[in-house]
Image (tube, rainbow, N blue to C red):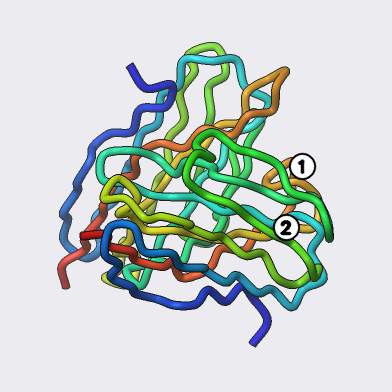
């Protein structure tokens, strides 16, 4: 099925450990995004990419790194996990910028629930 | 104060009831979006509005630009409508996208 696939779906890390979240889309979308969702707060943009080989910082980029080596994949890395990074992470992709124009369709992944202890 | 406020935070209703979810925002916007987050976590886009009203099936979205307010209505609600509904606004000028905290809707059979 076409869409956005995130792996893993769940992960528990110890403080200081590193991990990479993978987002894959098969719709040939240019724009890809990583968001985090925390209780009592709206989705917040971590990093985004406007095309293969490009990345840019969002609202809350500290503690994260990203790479877009292939158009279909957008990786989110945590080099040294902290309890403050406990969250649900969502990846999204779209052809033009996310929700930028009428009838633009955006696709979100199922989310990755990360707990840092 | 958050730039995007939704109410209620939680809503439980009986199947068949008419549902209204509200979204108020404090910035000038170029567009407002309603999203649906399924219990499994996936998020889908329902509507994008810049003025007036849109209808899709049993869902109706309205926006009042002067009052900085939007509503999402569900007619003849069904248990499969149970989800979190999220309002998001795109700020005029910098095009920043800001999300509300969501309204958790539960429809009881």
- State if disc 1 and disc 2 touch (CB < 8 Å): no
Residue that protrudes farthest toward the top in the picture: B66
First in sequence, mark 2 or 1: give its number: 2
- Give the residue pinned by disc 2: A94
- Residue A35 screen position, x and y as percent: 51, 50
Question: SS class of the residue under badge 1?
Answer: loop
Q: Callout 1: residue from which chain?
A: A
Q: Quadrant of the C terminus of chain B?
A: bottom left
Instruction: Answer left or right for A110 relative to B16.
Output: right
Q: Quadrant of the N terminus of chain B?
A: top left
Q: Residue at x 63, y 37 (%)?
A: B49
- The image quadrant of residue A106 is bottom right
Q: Nearer the viewer, mark 2 or mark 1?
A: 2
- Give the residue pinned by disc 1: A101
Question: SS class of the residue under badge 2?
Answer: strand
- Residue B90 screen position, x and y as percent: 62, 30
Q: Residue at x 51, y 32 (%)?
A: B98
- Number of other residues with Cα within 10 Å of mark 2, as a class: few under 14, some 14 to 19, many 20 or more: many
- Residue B101 screen position, x and y as percent: 34, 40
Mark 2 → mark 1, Cα distance in angstroms: 11 Å
Q: Residue at x 23, y 40 (%)?
A: B9
């Amino acid at each position: 099925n076409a869409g956005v696939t995130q792996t893993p779906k769940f992960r528990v890390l110890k403080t200081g450990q590193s991990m990479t979240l993978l987002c894959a889309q098969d719709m040939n979308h240019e724009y890809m995004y990583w968001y985090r969702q925390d209780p009592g707060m709206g989705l917040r943009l971590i990093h985004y990419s406007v095309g293969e080989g490009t990345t840019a910082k969002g609202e809350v980029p500290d503690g994260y790194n990203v790479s877009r080596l292939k158009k279909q994949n957008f990786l989110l890395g945590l080099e040294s996990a902290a309890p403050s990074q406990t969250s649900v992470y969502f990846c999204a992709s779209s052809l033009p910028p996310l929700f930028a124009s009428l009838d633009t369709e955006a696709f979100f992944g199922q989310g990755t629930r990360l707990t840092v202890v | 104060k958050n730039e995007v406020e939704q109410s209620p935070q939680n809503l439980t209703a009986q199947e068949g009831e008419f549902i209204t979810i509200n979204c108020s925002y404090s910035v000038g916007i170029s567009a407002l979006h309603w999203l649906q987050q399924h219990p499994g976590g996936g998020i889908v886009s329902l509507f994008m509005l810049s003025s007036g009203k849109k209808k899709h099936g049993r869902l109706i979205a309205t926006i009042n630009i002067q009052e900085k307010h939007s509503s999402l209505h569900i007619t003849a609600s069904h248990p499969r409508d149970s989800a979190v509904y999220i309002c998001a606004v795109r700020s005029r000028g910098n095009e920043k996208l800001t999300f509300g905290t969501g309204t958790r809707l539960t429809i009881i059979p």
